[in-house]
Image (tube, rainbow, N blue to C red):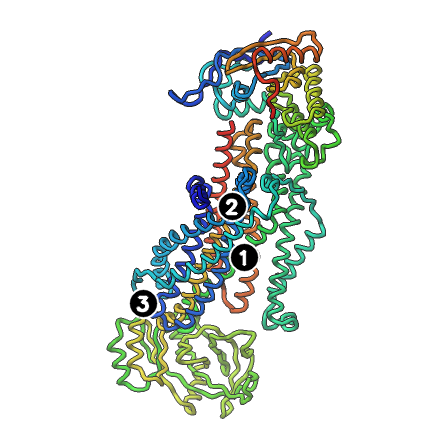
Amino acid sequence: MKPLLKVENIKKIYGKSSAAYTALENISFEIHEGEFVGIMGPSGAGKSTLLNMLATIDSPTEGKIYMRDVSIHDMRGVDLTDFRRNNLGFIFQDYNLLDSLTVKENILLPMAIAKIPAKQINISVMRIAKVFGIEDLLAKYPYQISGGQKQRTAAARALVTEPALILADEPTGALDSKSATDLLESLSELNENNHSTIMLVTHDAYAASFCNRIIFIKDGTLSKEIHRGDLTRKAFFQEIMDVLATIGGEVDDVI
Amino acid sequence: MTLFSLARKNIARNLSQYFLYIASMVFSIIIYFTFVTLKYSDTVAERTASSQKLDSLMSGAAVILIFFVAIFIAYSNSFFMKKRKKEVALYALLGVRNRQIGFMLFFENLLLGLVSLVVGILLGFLCSKGFMTILIYLMGYDVISPFTFSGTAALNTSTVFLIIFLVTSFQGYRLIYQFKLIDLFHASKKGEAVPKPSKGVAILGIMLIVIGYWLAMQDLFTSKVWEKVGFLMTALIILTTVIVGTFLLFHSVTGFVLALIKKNEKWLWKGLHLMTISQLLYRIRGNARTLTVIAVLSATTVTAGGAVYGLYYNTNDQVLTADPNTFMYRQTDAKYDKKVSAILPETKYDEAIEALSVTFNAKELNDLDGSGKRIYTVIDEKTYNKLAAIQNKEVLRLKEDHAVILDVGYDERFSPDYKGKTITTKNNTALTFQDVKTQTVLNAGTAGITVVVSNHTFEALQKDWESLTFRVIGVDKASVDLSGEMAKEIPEKGLFSSAPQDFQLALESVGSLLFIGSFLGLVFLAATGSIIYFKVLTEAEEDKSQYNMLHKMGVSSKEMRKSIASQVVVIFFVPLAAGLCHSVVALKAFSGLLMMDLAKPVLIWMVAYTVIYGLYYILTVASYNCIITQNNKTEG
């Protein structure tokens, strides 16, 4: 089976000549359709740089990224925005909901941007709202709901267009553990039932334990890759902790 | 590090942030200094015969300016302070004492004020020369303005602005005491409740405006309402109803309309329409006060400017109506005529007109002084038609025993109702007015109100009444100097009237009015534009993360630009439309009062205003886009 995403020998250098700083080097991996992949590593390891490149917001100094055999950084202008709109869904750490829109409107925004007919929009919104358990909140405004509900709204927004790849950047970073668990379980369910492909960037081992596969980055290079296989989530969590201990990253540096 | 050097370094490092604030202060100072320079200038005072009037006019305008400038600076100061709350909070968190922070802000503000004062006075000095030239030109003078620095003006400006700066600096000092630390950190992050539009309030708003309009459209002299309520009270009621109505309109009606649009899902859920409409709905009600201020400012500027410009524009017409001949006087002695002829250049025409001065018994015209006697200058139909042909006026056909009266001051509210009325002479020659004309062929200044009678009647009257000979002269491009020379030769009883002289007199008073009107108009316009500019850019700063999200979501920058442009267009042009609408009503009332047709000059004025206003719009949208694009680039 062909991979959905293929990262080939990525290198990213910031600055010029003497002040140059290598953020990423020799990064290659593949993500197949229906995978739930975690990217882990300590602060400054290059997680965000990698994510920005996958999001087509930044481009690598060397190497290529292919999505379904298309080199995404060779696209320009309108093609690029269209690509992003049609293939990628984002979940941000700080939700980024529009205060002026209701929960429902926030969720349907990407569909409206893609100019999908109103009837279709209504059906999709109801379906995704059910998955995240926010059907009762649809008429509310962001300032009326809690942080966890906001993040579920943001996740619903990222998933409503059924993008090929969902990029989640520390989605649980600002949530309490109960809300974080709710969100991660919903994502996990979507991955199992709908075969959504999700890439989760985090440095929280608990969040990472919901993934099927975890790629560790340290000092800009790939350091290790582990698969969950048939392990229970708890056992997998333990394995992650062990890896983190061996590669020497902080276990949790949220604060 | 002393507080003063900290304040100084703050300014040096964040110059770009401070730029807008400094620019608006410098602008205010330039305007004020220029104006005061003109006020104290000898050139203006010397050249005007009506300098006393001009001086008091200027003083009044200066007071309005101070008032306005103070509000404007307070506004930009609060905008500027809002941006810096976080920085202030950080100092407090790091353990700088409140008193020290307060002093730092105080000194910083004062320093900024002093710098802008020096820059403003220097630039204002350069500008005053240009404005002086304009003023002198508008007043129809022909002199070169001198290039002098006015110490009195500089002193006056410094005093006024130092007081303003002290007050704003003190406000900066109080900032740290006014808020809790947490508020300072989240100054720009407060969630506003999305408004629920109310039908009742919307209807009330519209009704208030309609009442105000209706009152304004009533004729000041004949209306029962004005008479009963009193002039001042009615004016106040009009102002209040219109302003409150405008506020409610922005507060509710716009929200109502937008909420209606929001129901149309098919249209709304397409592209960024959803975002555009929701942002507007979210913003417009919280900003109802600002929008009302803008609408009222625009209305004031356009009305005042339009009225003054209309007067200026009509000066020529009015002079031409009153003085259809370039020069005219009553001939009394041939030797004066010879002297006048010697001075005269080539003339278009130079005629001697036979006329009579007749006292009529005019009881039917319900005379105010009760005597019923009126003295009119009488000419015959033949003479009228001859002059009418020269002056490109319509030919007159008189019925026997009828007459036409030429009264340039005719106003149906005050003048007698001539038509159909009959006047008689002492030998019972009766004349019935078949028509009244507001145009004349003889200069009103020399001949007064003129009655045209048939050739036949004229002959009959000639026997009993004193006959007069008028000399009417038409000259192309006659100068005031020529008029002055002629005036010297003609004795007082010749009742010399001259179009150039009258035009000059009218220009002197209306020209200075126009100058002050447009000057204040310019200031108001610039301030209005800047207020919206500040406001919209503050919103841009708040919204940039939202646009960044849209960028990541795959919205092209073209679509974003479109959404931004249409959001800003509403903020700019909804209050402008309301303001223009108000001023149309006000000017309609004004032109009714003066019986003048102001349509053309007012239209010119409105277009000019809208064009400059439009430039502000373009600038604002460009800056907004710049903020968003830059943020999208740096944030990724």
Mark 1, secondary structure of its residue: helix
Same subunit under labels 1 and 3? yes
Quadrant of the image containing the N terminus of chain A? top right
Quarter of image, res B192: top right
Residue B63, percent from left and from top:
48, 63
Residue depth check, mark 1 versus mark 3: number of the one nearer the observer: 1
Q: Nearer the viewer, mark 3 or mark 2?
A: 2
Residue furthest toward the left?
A: B342
Q: Of circles 2 and 1, which is in front?
A: 2
Examine the rendered structure and indicate whether residue B151 appears above or below residue B614: below
Q: For marks 1 and 3, give the CA distance.
A: 38 Å
Q: Residues within 10 Å of mark 1 (few under 14, many from 20)?
A: many
Residue that carries the numbered disc 2 in the rendered image: B100
* Label 3, label 2: how far apart the Cα atoms are: 71 Å
Q: Is residue A157 above or below residue A73?
A: below
Vertical placement of residue B482 versus B247, above or below:
below
* Circle 2 chain: B
Task: Have a look at marks 3 and 2 and say if they share a chain.
Answer: yes
**Residue B411, image x and y in percent?**
53, 74
Q: Position of residue A212 (x, y in %)?
A: 65, 12
The C terminus of chain A: image quadrant: top right
Q: Chain of mark 1?
A: B
Which residue type does callout 1 highlight?
Ala
Is any atom of residue B202 visible in this view?
yes
- The mark found on residue A15 in the picture is none
Say whether marks 1 and 3 touch (CB < 8 Å). no
Q: Residue furthest right?
A: A136
Question: B165 or B201: which is nearer to us?
Answer: B165
Q: Which mark is residue B477?
A: 3
Answer with mark 1 or mark 3, whichever residue precedes in sequence. Answer: 1
Circle 1 residue:
B299
